[in-house]
Amino acid sequence: MSEIRVRIAPSPSGFLHVGTARTAITNWLYARHTGGKFILRIEDTDAERSSDDMVQSIVDSLKWLGLEWDEGPYFQSQRNELYQTYIEKLLASGNAYRCFCTPEELQVKREAAQKNKTDYKYDRTCLNLTPDEVQQKIDAGMPSVVRVKVPEGETVYEDVVYGRMVKQNKDIEDFVVCRKDGRPLYNFVVVVDDHEMGITDIIRGNDHQTNTFKQVLIYEALDLSAPRFAHLPLIIDERKKKISKRDKAANASDYGQQGFLPEAVVNYLSMLGWSPKDDREIFSVSELVEAFDLKGINKSNAMFDQVKMNHFNGEHIKMKTDHELAVMVAPLMVQAEVYTKYGLETRWQYLMEVIGLLKGRANVLGDFVERGEYFFRAPTVYDEKGAAKHFLPENVERLQVLADRFEALDKFDHDNLEATLKGFAEENDIKTGQLIHPTRLAVSGMTKGPGMYEMLAVLGREETVARMRAAAEYIREKASAK
RNA sequence: GUCCCCAUCGUCUAGCCUGGUCUAGGACACCGCCCUUUCACGGCGGCGACAGGGGUUCAAAUCCCCUUGGGGACGCCA
Protein backbone atom coordinates (compact mmCIF):
# COMPACT_ATOMS: atom_id res chain seq x y z
CA MET A 1 0.00 0.00 0.00
CA SER A 2 1.16 3.50 -0.71
CA GLU A 3 2.09 5.94 2.02
CA ILE A 4 -0.61 7.09 4.39
CA ARG A 5 -1.37 10.79 4.10
CA VAL A 6 -3.73 12.42 6.57
CA ARG A 7 -4.53 15.98 7.43
CA ILE A 8 -5.95 18.27 10.05
CA ALA A 9 -7.96 21.07 8.55
CA PRO A 10 -9.00 23.62 11.14
CA SER A 11 -10.89 26.73 10.23
CA PRO A 12 -9.39 29.79 11.88
CA SER A 13 -12.63 31.18 13.24
CA GLY A 14 -11.68 30.63 16.84
CA PHE A 15 -9.05 29.09 19.07
CA LEU A 16 -8.14 25.43 18.80
CA HIS A 17 -11.31 23.63 19.76
CA VAL A 18 -10.90 20.55 21.90
CA GLY A 19 -12.72 18.52 19.25
CA THR A 20 -10.30 19.73 16.62
CA ALA A 21 -7.44 18.94 18.97
CA ARG A 22 -8.68 15.40 19.41
CA THR A 23 -9.11 15.00 15.65
CA ALA A 24 -5.59 16.33 15.16
CA ILE A 25 -4.22 13.93 17.74
CA THR A 26 -5.92 10.96 16.10
CA ASN A 27 -4.65 11.90 12.65
CA TRP A 28 -1.17 12.56 13.96
CA LEU A 29 -1.07 9.30 15.87
CA TYR A 30 -2.22 7.42 12.80
CA ALA A 31 0.40 9.10 10.61
CA ARG A 32 3.18 8.44 13.08
CA HIS A 33 2.08 4.89 13.69
CA THR A 34 2.03 4.06 10.01
CA GLY A 35 5.03 6.13 9.05
CA GLY A 36 2.81 8.35 6.94
CA LYS A 37 2.53 12.10 6.53
CA PHE A 38 0.52 14.55 8.60
CA ILE A 39 -0.55 17.68 6.78
CA LEU A 40 -1.84 20.99 8.13
CA ARG A 41 -4.35 22.84 6.03
CA ILE A 42 -6.08 26.02 7.07
CA GLU A 43 -9.67 26.17 5.89
CA ASP A 44 -10.11 29.89 5.54
CA THR A 45 -12.43 30.17 2.57
CA ASP A 46 -14.75 32.21 4.76
CA ALA A 47 -12.64 35.34 4.84
CA GLU A 48 -15.05 37.26 7.07
CA ARG A 49 -14.67 34.79 9.88
CA SER A 50 -10.97 34.09 9.60
CA SER A 51 -8.09 36.04 11.03
CA ASP A 52 -4.33 35.79 11.16
CA ASP A 53 -4.40 35.88 14.93
CA MET A 54 -6.57 32.81 15.03
CA VAL A 55 -4.30 31.02 12.60
CA GLN A 56 -1.34 31.82 14.82
CA SER A 57 -3.17 30.68 17.91
CA ILE A 58 -4.11 27.37 16.33
CA VAL A 59 -0.61 26.81 15.01
CA ASP A 60 0.83 27.57 18.45
CA SER A 61 -1.56 25.18 20.13
CA LEU A 62 -0.77 22.34 17.75
CA LYS A 63 2.92 22.91 18.36
CA TRP A 64 2.37 22.99 22.10
CA LEU A 65 0.63 19.63 21.89
CA GLY A 66 3.66 18.33 20.04
CA LEU A 67 1.73 17.54 16.86
CA GLU A 68 4.34 18.61 14.36
CA TRP A 69 3.18 18.45 10.78
CA ASP A 70 5.12 17.28 7.75
CA GLU A 71 3.57 19.58 5.17
CA GLY A 72 1.84 22.92 5.25
CA PRO A 73 0.27 24.92 6.49
CA TYR A 74 -1.60 25.27 3.23
CA PHE A 75 -4.12 28.07 3.04
CA GLN A 76 -7.26 27.56 1.04
CA SER A 77 -7.58 31.29 0.59
CA GLN A 78 -4.46 31.11 -1.59
CA ARG A 79 -5.66 28.33 -3.83
CA ASN A 80 -8.62 29.96 -5.47
CA GLU A 81 -7.42 29.50 -9.05
CA LEU A 82 -7.16 25.79 -8.52
CA TYR A 83 -10.71 25.59 -7.26
CA GLN A 84 -11.98 27.56 -10.23
CA THR A 85 -10.64 25.06 -12.70
CA TYR A 86 -12.47 22.31 -10.86
CA ILE A 87 -15.67 24.35 -10.75
CA GLU A 88 -15.39 24.71 -14.53
CA LYS A 89 -14.90 20.98 -14.86
CA LEU A 90 -17.92 20.30 -12.76
CA LEU A 91 -20.06 22.66 -14.83
CA ALA A 92 -18.74 21.27 -18.08
CA SER A 93 -19.52 17.71 -17.04
CA GLY A 94 -23.16 18.61 -16.58
CA ASN A 95 -23.06 17.51 -12.98
CA ALA A 96 -23.58 21.05 -11.76
CA TYR A 97 -25.58 24.03 -12.86
CA ARG A 98 -25.89 27.74 -12.26
CA CYS A 99 -28.61 28.93 -9.94
CA PHE A 100 -29.86 32.51 -10.03
CA CYS A 101 -32.21 32.30 -7.08
CA THR A 102 -31.46 35.01 -4.55
CA PRO A 103 -30.84 34.31 -0.88
CA GLU A 104 -34.02 36.22 -0.14
CA GLU A 105 -36.12 34.03 -2.41
CA LEU A 106 -34.69 30.91 -0.86
CA GLN A 107 -35.23 32.24 2.61
CA VAL A 108 -38.92 32.70 1.90
CA LYS A 109 -39.24 29.11 0.70
CA ARG A 110 -37.28 27.81 3.65
CA GLU A 111 -39.48 29.60 6.14
CA ALA A 112 -42.63 28.47 4.40
CA ALA A 113 -41.48 24.87 4.66
CA GLN A 114 -40.71 25.32 8.30
CA LYS A 115 -44.13 26.77 8.91
CA ASN A 116 -45.81 23.82 7.24
CA LYS A 117 -43.54 21.51 9.17
CA THR A 118 -42.37 19.93 5.99
CA ASP A 119 -38.91 19.16 4.79
CA TYR A 120 -37.08 21.83 2.83
CA LYS A 121 -34.91 21.10 -0.14
CA TYR A 122 -33.95 23.34 -3.03
CA ASP A 123 -36.76 23.02 -5.59
CA ARG A 124 -34.47 23.00 -8.65
CA THR A 125 -36.04 26.10 -10.15
CA CYS A 126 -32.85 26.90 -12.05
CA LEU A 127 -32.18 23.36 -13.18
CA ASN A 128 -34.94 23.79 -15.73
CA LEU A 129 -33.37 26.83 -17.33
CA THR A 130 -32.34 26.35 -20.93
CA PRO A 131 -28.76 27.15 -21.95
CA ASP A 132 -30.07 30.26 -23.70
CA GLU A 133 -31.87 31.46 -20.61
CA VAL A 134 -28.78 30.92 -18.51
CA GLN A 135 -26.69 32.88 -20.98
CA GLN A 136 -29.23 35.67 -21.03
CA LYS A 137 -29.14 36.02 -17.26
CA ILE A 138 -25.38 36.00 -17.23
CA ASP A 139 -25.31 38.64 -19.94
CA ALA A 140 -27.80 40.67 -17.95
CA GLY A 141 -25.29 40.66 -15.12
CA MET A 142 -27.31 38.45 -12.79
CA PRO A 143 -25.14 36.78 -10.16
CA SER A 144 -25.34 33.03 -9.77
CA VAL A 145 -24.14 30.26 -7.52
CA VAL A 146 -23.13 26.79 -8.67
CA ARG A 147 -25.14 23.83 -7.46
CA VAL A 148 -24.30 20.17 -7.75
CA LYS A 149 -26.98 18.27 -9.63
CA VAL A 150 -27.61 15.33 -7.34
CA PRO A 151 -28.35 12.27 -9.48
CA GLU A 152 -30.97 9.58 -8.91
CA GLY A 153 -30.10 6.61 -6.82
CA GLU A 154 -28.10 6.34 -3.65
CA THR A 155 -24.71 7.36 -2.38
CA VAL A 156 -22.52 4.89 -0.57
CA TYR A 157 -19.21 4.89 1.20
CA GLU A 158 -17.43 2.53 3.53
CA ASP A 159 -16.63 4.05 6.91
CA VAL A 160 -13.69 2.55 8.77
CA VAL A 161 -15.53 3.10 12.04
CA TYR A 162 -19.21 2.87 11.17
CA GLY A 163 -19.18 0.42 8.31
CA ARG A 164 -21.19 0.75 5.12
CA MET A 165 -23.03 4.07 4.95
CA VAL A 166 -25.87 4.58 2.53
CA LYS A 167 -28.04 7.57 1.80
CA GLN A 168 -30.85 7.95 -0.67
CA ASN A 169 -30.03 10.78 -3.05
CA LYS A 170 -33.58 12.06 -2.89
CA ASP A 171 -32.74 13.10 0.66
CA ILE A 172 -29.86 15.27 -0.50
CA GLU A 173 -30.61 18.65 -2.02
CA ASP A 174 -28.72 20.20 -4.88
CA PHE A 175 -26.18 21.90 -2.66
CA VAL A 176 -24.18 24.99 -3.47
CA VAL A 177 -20.47 24.62 -4.10
CA CYS A 178 -19.64 28.13 -5.26
CA ARG A 179 -20.87 31.46 -3.98
CA LYS A 180 -22.23 34.15 -6.27
CA ASP A 181 -18.98 36.09 -5.77
CA GLY A 182 -17.06 33.13 -7.13
CA ARG A 183 -15.57 31.89 -3.87
CA PRO A 184 -15.94 28.11 -3.53
CA LEU A 185 -17.56 26.50 -0.50
CA TYR A 186 -16.35 24.05 2.09
CA ASN A 187 -17.67 20.77 0.71
CA PHE A 188 -16.10 21.49 -2.62
CA VAL A 189 -12.69 22.75 -1.59
CA VAL A 190 -12.29 19.87 0.80
CA VAL A 191 -12.70 17.41 -2.04
CA VAL A 192 -10.36 19.30 -4.35
CA ASP A 193 -7.71 19.73 -1.70
CA ASP A 194 -7.88 16.21 -0.37
CA HIS A 195 -7.49 14.96 -3.91
CA GLU A 196 -4.74 17.39 -4.85
CA MET A 197 -2.85 16.69 -1.64
CA GLY A 198 -3.13 12.95 -2.08
CA ILE A 199 -4.94 12.44 1.21
CA THR A 200 -5.51 8.72 1.71
CA ASP A 201 -7.54 8.76 4.90
CA ILE A 202 -9.96 11.36 6.16
CA ILE A 203 -10.31 11.09 9.90
CA ARG A 204 -12.70 13.61 11.40
CA GLY A 205 -15.65 14.06 13.74
CA ASN A 206 -18.90 12.29 12.95
CA ASP A 207 -20.65 15.64 12.73
CA HIS A 208 -19.29 15.50 9.18
CA GLN A 209 -21.10 12.31 8.31
CA THR A 210 -23.78 14.02 6.28
CA ASN A 211 -21.19 16.14 4.53
CA THR A 212 -19.43 12.98 3.51
CA PHE A 213 -22.28 11.96 1.22
CA LYS A 214 -22.10 15.33 -0.52
CA GLN A 215 -18.38 15.01 -0.86
CA VAL A 216 -18.63 11.51 -2.24
CA LEU A 217 -21.07 12.90 -4.79
CA ILE A 218 -18.49 15.49 -5.79
CA TYR A 219 -15.76 12.88 -6.14
CA GLU A 220 -18.07 10.95 -8.43
CA ALA A 221 -19.08 14.02 -10.40
CA LEU A 222 -15.43 14.88 -10.93
CA ASP A 223 -14.60 11.26 -11.69
CA LEU A 224 -12.09 11.08 -8.84
CA SER A 225 -11.62 8.20 -6.46
CA ALA A 226 -12.50 8.98 -2.87
CA PRO A 227 -10.17 8.38 0.06
CA ARG A 228 -11.05 6.21 3.04
CA PHE A 229 -13.25 7.80 5.67
CA ALA A 230 -13.12 7.27 9.41
CA HIS A 231 -15.54 9.22 11.54
CA LEU A 232 -14.81 9.77 15.17
CA PRO A 233 -17.40 9.92 17.94
CA LEU A 234 -17.96 13.42 19.25
CA ILE A 235 -16.69 14.80 22.52
CA ILE A 236 -19.73 15.86 24.47
CA ASP A 237 -20.28 17.93 27.59
CA GLU A 238 -22.23 17.11 30.76
CA ARG A 239 -25.41 18.02 28.92
CA LYS A 240 -24.51 15.40 26.33
CA LYS A 241 -24.25 18.03 23.62
CA LYS A 242 -21.36 18.38 21.24
CA ILE A 243 -18.83 20.34 23.25
CA SER A 244 -19.11 24.00 22.29
CA LYS A 245 -17.25 27.24 22.76
CA ARG A 246 -19.17 28.03 25.88
CA ASP A 247 -17.83 24.93 27.61
CA LYS A 248 -14.86 25.58 29.82
CA ALA A 249 -12.87 22.72 28.38
CA ALA A 250 -13.58 23.67 24.76
CA ASN A 251 -10.53 25.82 24.27
CA ALA A 252 -7.50 23.58 23.99
CA SER A 253 -5.28 26.63 23.72
CA ASP A 254 -5.96 27.26 27.40
CA TYR A 255 -4.77 23.95 28.76
CA GLY A 256 -1.18 25.04 29.07
CA GLN A 257 -2.17 28.09 31.05
CA GLN A 258 -4.25 25.89 33.30
CA GLY A 259 -1.21 23.84 34.23
CA PHE A 260 -1.68 20.81 32.03
CA LEU A 261 1.15 18.96 30.37
CA PRO A 262 0.81 18.46 26.61
CA GLU A 263 1.60 14.76 26.97
CA ALA A 264 -1.22 14.38 29.47
CA VAL A 265 -3.66 16.22 27.23
CA VAL A 266 -2.70 14.10 24.24
CA ASN A 267 -3.02 10.98 26.35
CA TYR A 268 -6.39 11.89 27.83
CA LEU A 269 -7.92 13.12 24.60
CA SER A 270 -6.69 10.08 22.74
CA MET A 271 -8.66 7.88 25.12
CA LEU A 272 -11.92 9.68 24.38
CA GLY A 273 -13.54 7.44 21.82
CA TRP A 274 -10.55 5.18 21.40
CA SER A 275 -9.21 2.29 23.41
CA PRO A 276 -6.06 0.19 23.16
CA LYS A 277 -8.30 -2.77 24.11
CA ASP A 278 -6.24 -3.73 27.10
CA ASP A 279 -6.44 -2.20 30.54
CA ARG A 280 -3.71 0.37 30.09
CA GLU A 281 -4.60 4.02 29.93
CA ILE A 282 -1.60 6.04 31.03
CA PHE A 283 0.65 6.25 28.00
CA SER A 284 3.66 8.26 27.03
CA VAL A 285 3.32 9.84 23.61
CA SER A 286 5.64 7.30 22.02
CA GLU A 287 3.73 4.44 23.60
CA LEU A 288 0.58 5.94 22.15
CA VAL A 289 2.11 6.08 18.68
CA GLU A 290 3.07 2.45 19.08
CA ALA A 291 -0.34 1.32 20.32
CA PHE A 292 -2.61 3.43 18.14
CA ASP A 293 -4.91 1.65 15.75
CA LEU A 294 -7.96 2.82 13.83
CA LYS A 295 -9.67 -0.39 14.87
CA GLY A 296 -9.88 0.77 18.47
CA ILE A 297 -12.14 3.70 17.66
CA ASN A 298 -15.59 3.63 19.24
CA LYS A 299 -18.91 4.58 17.76
CA SER A 300 -20.58 6.36 20.62
CA ASN A 301 -19.92 9.87 21.87
CA ALA A 302 -17.64 10.41 24.85
CA MET A 303 -18.17 12.85 27.67
CA PHE A 304 -15.31 15.11 28.63
CA ASP A 305 -14.40 14.56 32.28
CA GLN A 306 -12.26 17.30 33.77
CA VAL A 307 -11.59 15.28 36.92
CA LYS A 308 -10.20 12.40 34.97
CA MET A 309 -8.02 14.68 32.90
CA ASN A 310 -6.62 16.04 36.16
CA HIS A 311 -5.78 12.50 37.14
CA PHE A 312 -4.01 11.89 33.84
CA ASN A 313 -2.07 15.08 34.34
CA GLY A 314 -1.03 14.00 37.82
CA GLU A 315 0.27 10.73 36.43
CA HIS A 316 2.25 12.51 33.74
CA ILE A 317 3.68 14.92 36.29
CA LYS A 318 5.04 11.91 38.16
CA MET A 319 6.72 10.75 34.97
CA LYS A 320 8.68 14.00 34.67
CA THR A 321 12.07 14.63 36.26
CA ASP A 322 12.38 17.30 38.92
CA HIS A 323 14.39 19.40 36.53
CA GLU A 324 11.81 19.20 33.74
CA LEU A 325 9.12 20.23 36.18
CA ALA A 326 11.26 23.04 37.58
CA VAL A 327 11.59 24.48 34.10
CA MET A 328 7.82 24.62 33.81
CA VAL A 329 7.06 25.70 37.35
CA ALA A 330 9.64 28.48 37.68
CA PRO A 331 7.85 30.90 35.32
CA LEU A 332 4.59 30.27 37.15
CA MET A 333 6.23 31.14 40.44
CA VAL A 334 7.63 34.30 39.00
CA GLN A 335 4.25 35.15 37.56
CA ALA A 336 2.57 34.58 40.91
CA GLU A 337 5.28 36.73 42.49
CA VAL A 338 6.29 33.98 44.84
CA TYR A 339 9.92 34.61 44.04
CA THR A 340 12.05 36.46 41.51
CA LYS A 341 13.31 34.94 38.30
CA TYR A 342 16.86 35.62 39.36
CA GLY A 343 16.24 34.14 42.77
CA LEU A 344 14.94 30.92 41.32
CA GLU A 345 17.82 30.64 38.90
CA THR A 346 20.34 30.95 41.70
CA ARG A 347 18.47 28.45 43.86
CA TRP A 348 17.70 25.90 41.14
CA GLN A 349 18.82 22.91 43.17
CA TYR A 350 16.57 24.03 46.00
CA LEU A 351 13.64 24.49 43.60
CA MET A 352 14.10 20.95 42.33
CA GLU A 353 14.15 19.57 45.87
CA VAL A 354 10.91 21.38 46.64
CA ILE A 355 9.35 20.00 43.50
CA GLY A 356 10.55 16.52 44.36
CA LEU A 357 8.75 16.83 47.66
CA LEU A 358 5.49 17.97 46.10
CA LYS A 359 5.49 15.87 42.95
CA GLY A 360 3.54 12.90 44.29
CA ARG A 361 0.49 14.93 45.10
CA ALA A 362 0.24 17.50 42.32
CA ASN A 363 -2.40 17.38 39.59
CA VAL A 364 -1.75 20.64 37.80
CA LEU A 365 1.39 22.73 37.68
CA GLY A 366 -0.28 25.45 39.71
CA ASP A 367 -0.31 23.06 42.66
CA PHE A 368 3.45 23.47 42.94
CA VAL A 369 3.05 27.20 43.27
CA GLU A 370 0.20 27.07 45.75
CA ARG A 371 1.64 24.30 47.86
CA GLY A 372 5.26 25.30 47.53
CA GLU A 373 5.01 29.00 48.17
CA TYR A 374 6.11 28.72 51.80
CA PHE A 375 9.43 27.27 50.75
CA PHE A 376 10.26 30.67 49.35
CA ARG A 377 8.75 33.00 51.86
CA ALA A 378 7.54 32.65 55.42
CA PRO A 379 3.82 32.24 55.91
CA THR A 380 2.01 35.49 56.59
CA VAL A 381 -1.15 33.79 57.82
CA TYR A 382 -1.76 30.46 59.50
CA ASP A 383 -4.54 28.08 58.55
CA GLU A 384 -7.41 29.13 60.78
CA LYS A 385 -8.69 25.75 61.86
CA GLY A 386 -5.17 24.49 62.28
CA ALA A 387 -4.22 27.43 64.48
CA ALA A 388 -7.25 26.93 66.68
CA LYS A 389 -6.29 23.32 67.13
CA HIS A 390 -2.52 23.40 67.33
CA PHE A 391 -1.44 26.88 68.40
CA LEU A 392 -2.12 26.27 72.08
CA PRO A 393 -0.49 28.32 74.85
CA GLU A 394 1.60 25.35 76.03
CA ASN A 395 3.17 25.19 72.61
CA VAL A 396 4.90 28.54 72.97
CA GLU A 397 7.65 27.12 75.08
CA ARG A 398 7.73 23.82 73.27
CA LEU A 399 8.30 25.50 69.93
CA GLN A 400 11.00 27.67 71.42
CA VAL A 401 12.87 24.81 73.02
CA LEU A 402 12.51 22.63 69.94
CA ALA A 403 13.75 25.48 67.79
CA ASP A 404 16.79 25.83 70.04
CA ARG A 405 17.56 22.14 69.74
CA PHE A 406 17.08 22.15 65.97
CA GLU A 407 19.40 25.10 65.77
CA ALA A 408 22.09 23.26 67.69
CA LEU A 409 21.98 20.16 65.49
CA ASP A 410 25.26 18.97 63.94
CA LYS A 411 23.55 17.99 60.77
CA PHE A 412 20.17 19.41 59.89
CA ASP A 413 18.74 16.35 58.20
CA HIS A 414 15.73 14.07 58.31
CA ASP A 415 17.09 11.56 60.84
CA ASN A 416 18.45 14.09 63.28
CA LEU A 417 15.27 16.14 63.15
CA GLU A 418 13.18 13.08 63.81
CA ALA A 419 15.36 11.88 66.68
CA THR A 420 15.36 15.32 68.26
CA LEU A 421 11.64 15.77 68.04
CA LYS A 422 10.89 12.28 69.30
CA GLY A 423 13.29 12.69 72.18
CA PHE A 424 11.69 15.96 73.17
CA ALA A 425 8.23 14.39 72.99
CA GLU A 426 9.34 11.59 75.31
CA GLU A 427 10.82 14.00 77.81
CA ASN A 428 7.53 15.81 77.99
CA ASP A 429 5.53 12.64 77.89
CA ILE A 430 3.50 13.77 74.90
CA LYS A 431 2.81 12.22 71.53
CA THR A 432 4.97 13.20 68.59
CA GLY A 433 1.86 14.44 66.79
CA GLN A 434 1.46 17.11 69.46
CA LEU A 435 4.76 18.57 68.35
CA ILE A 436 4.61 17.79 64.67
CA HIS A 437 1.32 19.53 63.96
CA PRO A 438 2.20 22.87 65.57
CA THR A 439 5.64 22.76 63.99
CA ARG A 440 4.28 22.08 60.52
CA LEU A 441 1.80 24.89 60.91
CA ALA A 442 4.46 27.25 62.24
CA VAL A 443 6.77 26.57 59.34
CA SER A 444 4.32 26.26 56.43
CA GLY A 445 1.16 27.95 57.61
CA MET A 446 -0.65 24.83 56.44
CA THR A 447 -1.96 21.68 58.08
CA LYS A 448 -1.02 19.43 55.24
CA GLY A 449 1.96 18.85 53.03
CA PRO A 450 4.90 16.55 52.51
CA GLY A 451 6.52 14.49 55.26
CA MET A 452 7.55 17.05 57.85
CA TYR A 453 11.14 15.99 58.49
CA GLU A 454 11.89 16.02 54.78
CA MET A 455 10.18 19.33 54.50
CA LEU A 456 12.25 20.92 57.26
CA ALA A 457 15.44 19.42 55.94
CA VAL A 458 14.82 21.05 52.58
CA LEU A 459 13.73 24.34 54.06
CA GLY A 460 16.94 24.55 56.06
CA ARG A 461 18.03 25.32 59.57
CA GLU A 462 17.84 29.07 59.52
CA GLU A 463 14.33 29.41 58.08
CA THR A 464 12.92 26.57 60.14
CA VAL A 465 14.18 27.94 63.42
CA ALA A 466 13.18 31.51 62.64
CA ARG A 467 9.68 30.50 61.66
CA MET A 468 9.21 28.36 64.75
CA ARG A 469 10.23 31.25 66.95
CA ALA A 470 8.00 33.65 65.07
CA ALA A 471 5.06 31.30 65.54
CA ALA A 472 5.80 30.95 69.25
CA GLU A 473 5.76 34.71 69.53
CA TYR A 474 2.53 34.85 67.55
CA ILE A 475 0.85 32.38 69.90
CA ARG A 476 2.09 34.23 72.98
CA GLU A 477 0.82 37.56 71.73
CA LYS A 478 -2.51 36.16 70.78
CA ALA A 479 -2.93 34.46 74.15
CA SER A 480 -2.10 37.62 76.09
CA ALA A 481 -4.41 39.71 73.92
CA LYS A 482 -7.38 37.74 75.13
C1' G B 1 -40.26 18.45 9.74
C1' U B 2 -36.55 15.19 6.94
C1' C B 3 -32.31 12.13 6.88
C1' C B 4 -28.34 9.67 9.44
C1' C B 5 -25.86 7.62 13.68
C1' C B 6 -25.47 5.64 18.63
C1' A B 7 -27.00 2.64 23.24
C1' U B 8 -22.31 -2.01 29.12
C1' C B 9 -21.23 0.95 36.20
C1' G B 10 -22.38 8.47 37.53
C1' U B 11 -18.13 9.06 33.71
C1' C B 12 -14.15 6.82 30.16
C1' U B 13 -14.10 1.90 28.62
C1' A B 14 -12.97 -4.09 27.97
C1' G B 15 -16.08 -7.96 26.32
C1' C B 16 -19.92 -7.90 20.98
C1' C B 17 -17.49 -9.10 14.69
C1' U B 18 -15.97 -15.28 15.43
C1' G B 19 -22.94 -16.65 21.06
C1' G B 20 -21.01 -20.69 26.17
C1' U B 21 -14.55 -19.16 29.52
C1' C B 22 -19.20 -12.92 32.16
C1' U B 23 -21.87 -14.60 39.54
C1' A B 24 -19.63 -8.72 33.05
C1' G B 25 -13.05 -6.91 33.73
C1' G B 26 -10.10 -2.15 34.22
C1' A B 27 -9.83 3.26 35.16
C1' C B 28 -11.74 8.13 37.28
C1' A B 29 -14.91 9.63 41.19
C1' C B 30 -17.00 8.01 45.91
C1' C B 31 -16.76 4.96 50.66
C1' G B 32 -13.94 1.78 54.14
C1' C B 33 -9.33 -0.51 55.94
C1' C B 34 -3.89 -0.68 55.97
C1' C B 35 0.53 2.52 55.82
C1' U B 36 1.27 7.31 58.38
C1' U B 37 2.64 13.32 62.12
C1' U B 38 -1.04 15.67 58.14
C1' C B 39 -2.74 15.74 53.10
C1' A B 40 -1.47 12.87 49.21
C1' C B 41 0.95 8.50 47.01
C1' G B 42 0.79 3.24 47.42
C1' G B 43 -1.70 -1.52 48.89
C1' C B 44 -6.32 -4.11 49.96
C1' G B 45 -11.60 -4.14 49.84
C1' G B 46 -16.57 -1.99 48.81
C1' C B 47 -20.42 0.60 45.92
C1' G B 48 -21.89 0.46 40.91
C1' A B 49 -23.93 -1.37 34.34
C1' C B 50 -25.51 -5.24 29.79
C1' A B 51 -32.17 0.85 28.27
C1' G B 52 -37.04 -2.11 27.63
C1' G B 53 -39.70 -5.86 24.95
C1' G B 54 -39.95 -9.70 21.48
C1' G B 55 -37.41 -13.36 18.47
C1' U B 56 -33.34 -17.02 16.88
C1' U B 57 -30.69 -20.79 19.84
C1' C B 58 -29.51 -26.21 24.09
C1' A B 59 -27.23 -21.33 25.34
C1' A B 60 -27.40 -13.96 24.06
C1' A B 61 -24.15 -8.33 26.88
C1' U B 62 -22.85 -10.78 22.27
C1' C B 63 -27.16 -12.29 16.28
C1' C B 64 -32.24 -10.20 14.29
C1' C B 65 -36.68 -7.00 14.91
C1' C B 66 -39.55 -3.34 17.47
C1' U B 67 -39.98 0.39 21.21
C1' U B 68 -37.71 3.98 24.09
C1' G B 69 -33.82 7.18 25.01
C1' G B 70 -29.67 10.15 23.36
C1' G B 71 -26.83 12.58 19.62
C1' G B 72 -25.63 14.67 14.78
C1' A B 73 -26.76 17.01 10.05
C1' C B 74 -30.17 19.71 7.23
C1' G B 75 -26.44 27.71 5.23
C1' C B 76 -24.32 31.63 -0.89
C1' C B 77 -20.52 28.65 7.58
C1' A B 78 -16.64 25.18 8.28
Image (spheres, rainbow, N blue to C red):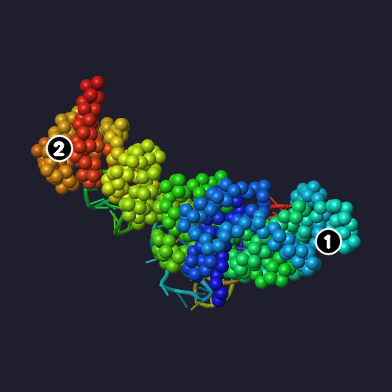
Instruction: Identify the residue position indicated by label 2 in the image.
Output: A407
Question: Residue B42 vs residue A229: left or right?
Answer: left
The amino acid type, in three-letter code, at marker 2 is Glu
Which quarter of the picture shows residue A126? bottom right
Q: Nearer the viewer, residue A122 or A326?
A: A326
The residue drawn where x is 19% and y is 39% is: A461
Quarter of the image where the N terminus of chain A is located: bottom right
Vertical placement of residue A289 versus A392, above or below: below
Near mark 2 (Cα within 10 A), the count class, few <14, some 14-19 or many ≥20, is some
Coordinates of residue A330 in the picture (x, y in percent): 36, 45
Disc 1 chain ID: A
Q: Residue at x 73, y 68 (%)?
A: A221
Please state the chain letter of the residue tagged with numbered disc 2 in the rendered image: A
The mark nearer the N terminus, 1 or 2, is: 1
Residue B27 position in % (x across, y down): 39, 58
Q: Measured along the vertical axis of the image, is residue A446 above or below residue A451? A: above
* Residue highlighted by disc 1: A127
In the image, farthest residue toward the left: A427
Q: Position of residue A2 (x, y in %)?
A: 56, 74
Q: Residue at x 50, y 49 (%)?
A: A253
**Left or right relative to A387: residue A196:** right
